[in-house]
Image (tube, helix red, strand yellow):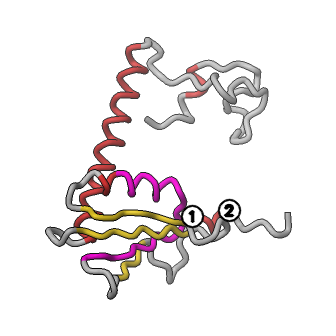
């Protein structure tokens, strides 16, 4: 498509771009808006949920200004016992811990299943070709979905 944006422009920062910009709200007390460049609903919704778990948060919401613009705005208002920036930092720390717990639980389940590595032959597996093939070593070229072939593609 000629109108399609370059995929790399959706997640790679330019030399003059910042990942996060903070704008304190002058009309609402203890509030700030955080602009996350090159991010989407995935980060916005996870951050909103993690920040709202803190009882000192009066409001936390996010929005994506336009579907073709890779930017997320997260607005946080606190009760004054902590700053919106501190609330965001605590939410990020909580989110990182939860993702670490999920990663460990996944590893435990894979080891308990006896596979040792992850078999990606479920949804989308056994497709007959590998779009990420590098010199014939890829998963699915011969129609198989063995764990030994998939282990190079799953980093857990």
Residue 62 in the image: x percent, y percent?
Answer: 46, 64
The residue drawn where x is 14% and y is 68% is 81
Residue 131 in which image quadrant: top right
Magenta stretch in the rendered image: 30-49
Which mark is on residue 11? 1
Q: Residues within 10 Å of mark 2 (few under 14, many from 20)?
A: few
Q: Is residue 108 magenta?
A: no
Which mark is on residue 68? none
Residue 84 in the image: x percent, y percent?
Answer: 27, 71
Query: Residue placed farthest to the left in the image?
Result: 81
Residue 19 in the image: x percent, y percent?
Answer: 44, 72
Judge left or right: residue 142 versus residue 82.
right
Residue 93 in the image: x percent, y percent?
Answer: 27, 54
Cα distance in 3D space between marks 1 and 2: 8 Å
SS under mark 1:
loop
Are circles 1 and 2 on residues that touch, CB within 8 Å? yes
The residue drawn where x is 30% and y is 76% is 31
Residue 60 in which image quadrant: bottom left
Q: What residue sits right under mark 2 in the picture? A: 7
The N terminus lies in quadrant: bottom right
Q: Is residue 45 magenta?
A: yes
The residue drawn where x is 35% and y is 28% is 105
């Amino acid at each position: 498509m000629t109108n399609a944006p370059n995929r790399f422009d959706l997640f790679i920062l330019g030399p003059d771009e910042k990942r996060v910009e903070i704008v304190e709200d002058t009309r609402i007390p203890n509030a700030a808006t955080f602009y996350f460049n090159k991010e989407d609903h995935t980060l916005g919704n996870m951050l909103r949920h993690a920040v709202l778990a803190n009882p000192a948060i009066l409001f936390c919401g996010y929005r994506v200004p336009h579907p073709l613009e890779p930017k997320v705005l997260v607005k946080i208002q606190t009760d004054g016992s902590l700053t919106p920036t501190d609330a965001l930092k605590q939410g990020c720390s909580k989110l990182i811990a939860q993702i670490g717990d999920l990663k460990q639980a996944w590893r435990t389940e894979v080891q308990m299943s006896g596979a040792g590595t992850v078999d990606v032959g479920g949804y989308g597996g056994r497709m007959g070709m590998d779009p990420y093939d590098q010199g014939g070593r890829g998963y699915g070229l011969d129609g198989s979905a063995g764990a030994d072939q998939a282990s190079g593609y799953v980093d857990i």
